Image (tube, grey):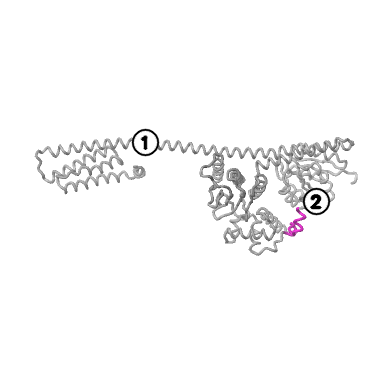
Amino acid sequence: MSNQKTTIFLVDDHPLVREWLTNLIHQQPDLVVCGEAETAAEALEAMARKKPDVAIVDISLKSGSGIGLIKDLRTLRPPVAVIVLSMHDENLYAERALRAGARGYIMKRETSKKIIAAVRQVLEGKLYLSGRLTALFAERFLDGNTPPLGPSVGKLSDRELEVFQLLGQGYETRQIAEHLHVSMKTVQAFCARIKEKLNLTTATELLREAIRWHENQQAQ
Amino acid sequence: MFGWHTRLEPQSRPLFVLAALVIVIGVGVVDYATGWELSLSVFYLLALGLATWFVGKGFAFFISVLSVAVSLAGDLATGQRYSSRLVPWWNASIVLVFYVVVVSLLAKLRALYGELELRVKQRTAALSDEMAERERLERELLEISEREQRRISHDLHDSLGQHLTGAALAGQVLEEKLSTRGLPEAADANKVVELIEEGIAISRKLAKGLHPIEMQADGLMQALEELAATSSELLKVSCRFECDSPVLIRDAATSGHMYRIAQEAISNAVKHGKARNITIQLETLDDGIALRLKDDGSGLPDVLPRTAGMGLRIMSHRAGMIGAIFTARREDSGGTTVTCLLRHEDNAKKLPGE
């Protein structure tokens, strides 16, 4: 096993990126690219055969989504460690990718230096995230807002919790007002109080937390 | 002044026929009752007028003859003796000629009036066609610019960004090759990689500026949040975004237009109103979703400078395109409030699970 190279599979719809990613990886004596694919379907099929150790996956693919692919890859035996390599902002996609089962997230603008480091770190069984994102997640953990624990919803009143749940299910203010038979103003007041209690500053954050919490509840 | 008749005319023709006849008979009865000395021939003109204007020339001539006949019959029926038997007939003939002239003139007038009206209608139609065409063009222009921006943004983000990523990777490979040989040029290669990565960051920023909204329902909230932050930074004003409960807009084009309205309003507030504080509010109301921009500038002037007028027009256009109601007004307390109200029906989506 020790003299056997670690195999890496590339899923990216841009040929230039695949080509130079391969060259970069081949600079490393112990790493080898065992295959590449442009679409999610192709990738799943090829990886089932080649059984790579690590997969580097772009989120936006020609057909099929990278996130969907990552979810599908969880069924592979032996498991493959997925690193997401994406043009998209980590704020928007990193958490989603990790929840889907990825072990690392790298934005393409910082690819070159970090990709090899990420591969090594993931092979050691650790997560690989940017310093900024790691700090953010740590902060959430300390706030008690980390996903496994759920946000500190214990502080919410029953009514506020109800609003919070409905938000998480994708209901809009108007629909929540109809559902709870209260006025729009009341829902807005509830939202303001929830934000205060959960230490959130914007409605976007409120929505994200609500969705995160809801997904968490579903998972449990 | 005869505007009302156009609405009456088609369906009420028989009514006017009846009215004319009733008037003739009515005046005839009065004529008979008042005796032969008094001439009431002027009152028959009312019937003639109605007949000419609303029914037609032929009928009007008939009414003329009828009026004269009724009047003559009435006069004769009183049994009055004239100096000559021809006198009443002579008088009747005079009145008849007079009636015929009046009817002819009135009919001519009516024809001219009809022609004029037709022409006005044609012109109006042409004008409203032209206006519709212009509006369509303006809309098309906005759409084209939006589409182009989206396309360029997409190209920058995807094609160029990906290409640069490949280039950065290539540079990295070069750097590693150089450094394994212990060559000092490795540092230069490293610099090249850094420069390319900066290039990726720049292309991302450009792409974001061109197409600021992520394709998600909560995209507008995020984009407005960022707009408030960048406006504060770049325009040296205090720009705040207020949004109590999440506002979701499903349609990306709608979000896009609302975002551009906010952008334009901020630029107007700073450029023309010299505002120092701007508040962007996004709120769900009973009748729709309201985007409101309040500033403490000098308010809308009575006479708009050309550029501001254009900005307002475009904002109101954008609002129109998404079916929203746009208003911009000067506050009594100073400053301007720009509101764009998107009705719920235009943002409707069924409740999940229903």
Q: Does B18 appear above or below B111?
A: below
Q: Which residue is mark 2?
A: A127
**What is the secondary structure assignment of the residue under circle 2?**
loop
Q: Is residue B277 at all visible to an observer of this figure?
A: yes
Callouts 1 and 2 on one subunit: no
Q: Position of residue B75 (x, y in %)?
A: 15, 44
Q: Read off the chain for label 2.
A: A
- Specify start and end residues of the magenta stretch as a single range: A136-150
**Callout 1: few (<14), some (14-19), or many (20+) C-alpha neighbours within 10 Å?**
few
Disc 1, disc 2: CB below 8 Å? Answer: no
Q: Is residue B195 left or right of residue B269?
A: right
Which of B222 and A1 lies nearest the eye of the viewer?
A: B222
Structural distance between the alpha carbons of marks 1 and 2: 83 Å
Residue flagged by tag 1: what amino acid is it? Leu
Q: Which residue is mark 1?
A: B116
Of the 4 image quadrants, the one containing the C terminus of chain A is: bottom right
